[in-house]
Amino acid sequence: MDCGIIPDRVGEQAPGNDEINGRHPMKFGPAKHFIALLLAAPLLTGCLERGQPTMADTSADDDAFCRANNVAAGSNDYVNCRKNRDVQRGNANARADRSQRNMAEQMLNNPVRP
């Protein structure tokens, strides 16, 4: 059997010639870049979560706490109450961060060996 082009089948290509209409069948053009981006996107989203996590909105809790003392919104006592709540929250976050750092350093400096 001859592997050449059979004369009565016009348009058929010789064996080993994988080009179709001038394009290689494995070249997808921009589609391959889009697929690669879709595959890499979940891996890259972890890079966005650096630093402080998203904080919950606590303004309603602070407002309710400060109004519970019969203080009118906008008065000096109300503003001071909100500031104090904000400082307390910041101090609690700083304590939690410091505790986490201390624990990490303690674990690094004193590894448990079985």
Image: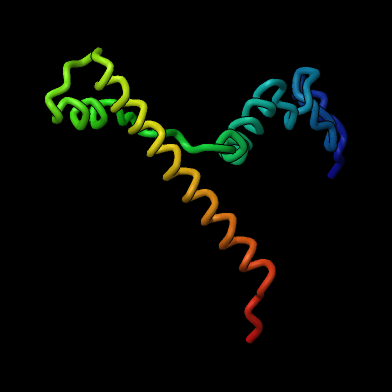
Residue depicted at 58% across the width and 40% down the height: 46
Residue depicted at 48% across the width and 38% down the height: 53
Residue 88 vertical placement versus 76 (above, below): below
Residue 98 vertical placement versus 88 (above, below): below
Classify residue 66 as left or right of residue 30.
Answer: left
Residue depicted at 18% across the width and 28% down the height: 64
Residue depicted at 32% across the width and 24% down the height: 80
The image quadrant of residue 5 is top right
The N terminus appears in which quarter of the rendering?
top right
Could you say which is closer to the camera, residue 58 or residue 70?
Answer: 70
Q: Residue furthest top?
A: 74
Residue 55 vertical placement versus 91 (above, below): above
The C terminus appears in which quarter of the rendering?
bottom right
What colouring style does the render use?
rainbow
Residue 4 placed where, x, y %?
87, 34
Number of marks: 0
Residue 89 placed where, x, y %?
39, 38
The image quadrant of residue 113 is bottom right
Residue 108 placed where, x, y %?
67, 66
Could you say which is closer to the camera, residue 15 or residue 87?
Answer: 87
